[in-house]
Amino acid sequence: MDVRATLKEGMNRLREGRVPSHTLAAELLLMHVLGCERAWLYSRHEEVLDPGKVEHYLHLVVRRIAGVPTQYLTGRQEFWGLEFEVTPDVLIPRPETEHVIEVALARLGQGQDSSWTGAGMTEDRAEGSRTGTRAALDAAMYGAGLRIADVGTGSGCLAVALAHELPEAVVVATDISSAALAVARRNAVRNGVAQRIQFVQCNLLGALESGRLPPLSKGRSELPPSTNVGARHAVPFRPPAMLPRFHVIVSNPPYVGRSEAGLLPREVREHEPAQALFAGEQGCEIYALLIGQADKLLGSGGTLVLEIGYNALDRVRPLFDSYAWTNVGVTNDLAGIPRVIAAEKL
């Protein structure tokens, strides 16, 4: 079979199997098997394919019809313009989660004067205004001195994207799953930011509440300290024994209620990791614990940015109604659904 006939067969089978976006799925699976880009498929459509590759492709089509997500079949997904490895051990990064990055970066730009003391700002603003302004600009543009935590990192998409955007920031990424952390480490290496991210296995921020970082894990120790890739100043990441307070904490935590499992698409319900999806019966149980931990670990003026689930805002927003939080804001996704809530630590 040639490229055109093979692709057409895949499209027909996926359409008959009622696979959403069957044309895109057919293209992505064939591109994966052939190791090519979309333009090649349509410019070389008469090229005859090796029968083994056709067989492999049609086998993947059968698995996709059975409900296995395309991303797990190809082993990759784009997020924030970066490519990430994905396996059934991690959630597939979704475009909606990019709003967490957008809000975190926006908050950093807006709050640099009040929250970046210790990240290069001078204490005496009257006498050191020029130094402070330059430090604030460096912090906003490059993340100089910035400490970030990503809670429930999964594939590492938030941690890696923020480290990529802020090439002088350091990141601690936590997850309860050792398998997920292994994927996240590989993604940090893939995207050139592994030297500035420490991966910690724990529930939410539990291992950090003592104020100390646990020893580097086995997977992390194989990456010796070295100069930050792309940093303007050569500053290796050697985590201190005593953990300073964070400037930013981000998270896309589990937020689907067990009672809502039947409403999820089959691809999600049957194939993505339940531990990363479900949080109690209602889906909001995890937020109170996470907000309480963030209250202890954020410095004054620090920012907490959380993704929230559909219809969760009315249950999550009141958790910030305490003396510890101010400047609470909500960001809608492109469908107009409240997707991200952010707040500043007093």
Image: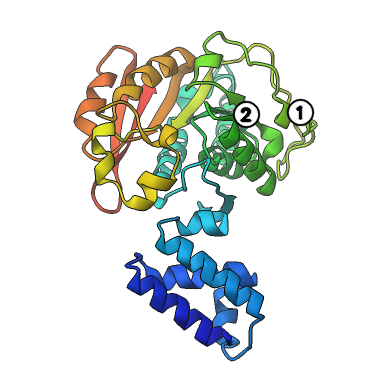
Instruction: Determine whether 160 is above or below 4 in the image.
Output: above
Residue 322 quadrant: top left
Residue 104 x %, y %: 44, 37
Residue 286 quadrant: top left
Q: Which of 316 and 16 lies nearest the eye of the viewer?
A: 16
Residue 195 x %, y %: 71, 35
| Residue at 52% in and 34% down | 153
Secondary structure at numbered mark 1 = helix
Secondary structure at numbered mark 2 = strand
| Residue at 71% in and 30% down | 220
Q: CA distance from mark 1 to mark 2?
A: 10 Å
| Residue 26 marker | none
Residue on which the image places disc 2: 199
Instruction: Determine whether 6 is above or below 187 in the image.
Output: below
Q: Which of 122 and 146 lies nearest the eye of the viewer?
A: 146
Q: How is the image coloured?
A: rainbow
Q: Is residue 1 visible?
A: yes
| Residue at 55% in and 39% down | 156
Amino acid residing under circle 1: Ser
Residue on which the image places disc 1: 221
Q: Earlier in the sequence, mark 1 or mark 2?
A: 2
Q: Quadrant of the N terminus?
A: bottom right
